[in-house]
Structures are given as C-alpha cells and as structure tokens.
Image: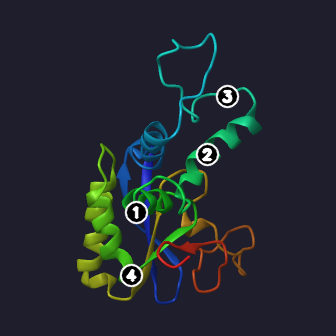
C-alpha cells in the first residue's frame, strides 16, 4: 500500500524518518486531481471516454513527453498569477518533491492543511506535524519534509555517498544539500 512519509531534520541537518500516513493516494495525487478539476479544462481523449466525462492529465497517455507537459499544467498552478487561493497554493507547493518546512513555520502549515477542503490525508499529516511540535524528543528539530510521492527515495536515502561504504548513501542534510527549498521563504 502506498504511503506519505514525514521526515524530521535535527540541528545537525540530517533527515530522519518520523512517521507515515497509509494510503498515499489521498496525498499529493488527490490534491493535484482536485485542483486540476477545479481550475483546468478537461482533456479530450477521443474514443476512450464519454464526452461529458472528465479526463485527467494524470491518466494514461501514450506519449510520455506530452503526458509530462500536461501534468506540468497542474503544478504550474502554484504561480502567484494563477486562480488558486493562498491556502490551495501553499498546499500544492507542499506536495512538491524537495519541499521543506522550517520548524517555526509548522503551525502555519498545520493551519493550511486543516483549512484545505476535500477528502485527503492532510488532516492526518497535520496531526503528525502537531505531534512533532509537542514531542519532547523533537526539541532539536529544525525542519520537516513530507514525501507525498514515491518519485524520490526517502530523505534518509538521498544524501551524499557514505565515506565508509560508498555503495550506501547518507541521509539528506538540509544544512549542506542544495536540492530542497523552503515552503515559506522560496
């Protein structure tokens, strides 16, 4: 079964698995589909569906490059000039690979997750984020990341090669790595 994984970063900067929410299909994909249906026109797919039915950019497409471009239309809704509300924009941005939320911004993210309308796993994710804030074992946490898709490996597997065992990878470090972005500053 798919899942959404939540990672913490302690003051040393390394990723550490914290928790997960089962049924990842209620995470990023569900959010993308909801926003797509609300803000973008249906695609036509002659011969495959009835004309009145909605055809998603995330459905099967025989031309892979074309499929990527169509999906990008949904992700581009994050732009400031799109019709999304600020809440929808923050939630959409939080589903992107490499998104990190600083500890001081977690209350804001929790608020936006709880405010988002729709049957998603955001309420469960908000509960876990609140647990991190309340957990005495997490007092040295400086940031969190939520892996909403299986496109990238877990944050604990995508860092630099281990100097002792080059076949293995260290957890990602937000203090030295350059792949991530911060939800509320970038």
CB within 8 Å, label 4 to label 2: no
Apparent side of residue 162 relative to residue 35 in the rendered image (left or right): right
Q: Which mark is residue 86?
A: 1
> For mark 4, does the 10 Å Cα neighbourhood hold few (<14), some (14 to 19), or many (20 or more) residues?
many
Disc 3 from disc 4: Cα separation: 39 Å
Q: Residue at x 60, y 72 (%)?
A: 180
CB within 8 Å, label 3 to label 1: no
Per the image, the residue denoted by label 3 is 61
Apparent side of residue 57 relative to residue 125 in the rendered image (left or right): right
- Mark 1 secondary-structure assignment: helix
- Mark 4 secondary-structure assignment: helix
- Mark 3 secondary-structure assignment: loop
> For mark 3, does the 10 Å Cα neighbourhood hold few (<14), some (14 to 19), or many (20 or more) residues?
some
CB within 8 Å, label 2 to label 3: no
Disc 3 from disc 1: Cα separation: 31 Å
> For mark 2, does the 10 Å Cα neighbourhood hold few (<14), some (14 to 19), or many (20 or more) residues?
few
Per the image, the residue denoted by label 4 is 103
CB within 8 Å, label 2 to label 1: no
Q: Position of residue 113 (x, y in %)?
A: 32, 60
């Amino acid at each position: 079964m798919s899942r959404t994984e939540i990672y913490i970063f302690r003051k040393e900067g390394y990723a550490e698995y914290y928790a997960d929410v089962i049924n990842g299909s209620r995470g990023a994909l569900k959010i993308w589909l909801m926003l797509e249906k609300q803000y973008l026109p249906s695609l036509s797919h002659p011969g495959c569906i009835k004309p009145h039915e909605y055809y998603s950019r995330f459905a099967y497409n025989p031309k892979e490059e074309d499929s990527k471009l169509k999906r990008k239309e949904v992700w581009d809704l994050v732009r400031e000039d799109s019709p999304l509300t600020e809440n929808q924009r923050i939630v959409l941005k939080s589903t992107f690979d490499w998104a990190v939320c600083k500890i001081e911004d977690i209350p804001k993210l929790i608020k936006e997750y709880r405010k988002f309308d729709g049957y998603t796993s955001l309420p469960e994710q908000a509960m876990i984020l609140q647990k991190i804030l309340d957990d005495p074992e997490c007092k040295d946490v400086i940031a969190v990341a939520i892996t909403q898709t299986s496109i990238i490996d877990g944050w604990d597997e995508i860092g630099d090669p281990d100097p002792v065992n080059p076949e293995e990878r260290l957890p990602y470090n937000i203090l030295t790595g350059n792949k991530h972005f911060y939800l509320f500053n970038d």
